[in-house]
Amino acid sequence: MPKVAGRKKLVNIAEAKAQLSRLVKRVERGEVILIGRYGRVVAKLVPPDTPPKPKRVPGIWKGKVWIAPDFDEPNAEIARMMEEGPIEPSAR
């Protein structure tokens, strides 16, 4: 397969059909694949235009979230319902 300027490679249609999954993996790595017929470019496989992920900043939610001090305390009413309630839901 002849090399084209930069990170672009020219692949004939028969090879592209036979090795599509390999070509897609190369495109995922940032490569541009040109597909040709009779030495002429007829299509181009390119990575999608996705915005870069924003950099994570630790502590960004500090002071914005509040959890009640009794958040993980047992609830007597829920415990009673689980212990005394039916095992199967009642039919409607």
Image (tube, rainbow, N blue to C red):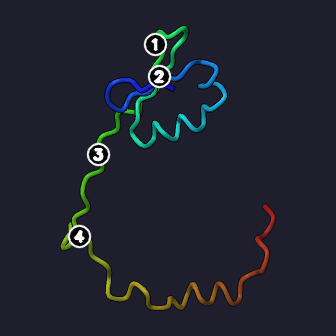
* Disc number placed over residue 52 in the picture, else none: 3
Tell me how far mark 1 sits from mark 4, CA to CA. Answer: 47 Å
Per the image, the residue denoted by label 4 is 58
- Nearer the observer, disc 4 or disc 2? 2
Q: CA distance from mark 3 to mark 4?
A: 18 Å
In whole angstroms, how far apart are the C-alphas of marks 4 and 2? 44 Å
Q: Position of residue 48 (x, y in %)?
A: 40, 33
Per the rendering, the mark at residue 11 is: none
Secondary element at tag 2: strand
Query: Of helix, strand and loop, which one carries label 1?
Result: strand
The three-letter code of the residue at mark 2 reads Leu
Outermost residue toward the front in this view = 2
Q: Residue furthest left?
A: 63
What x and y, as percent, mark residue 12? 56, 19
CB under 8 Å between discs 3 and 4: no
Q: CA distance from mark 3 to mark 2?
A: 28 Å
Of labels 1 and 4, the one closer to you: 1
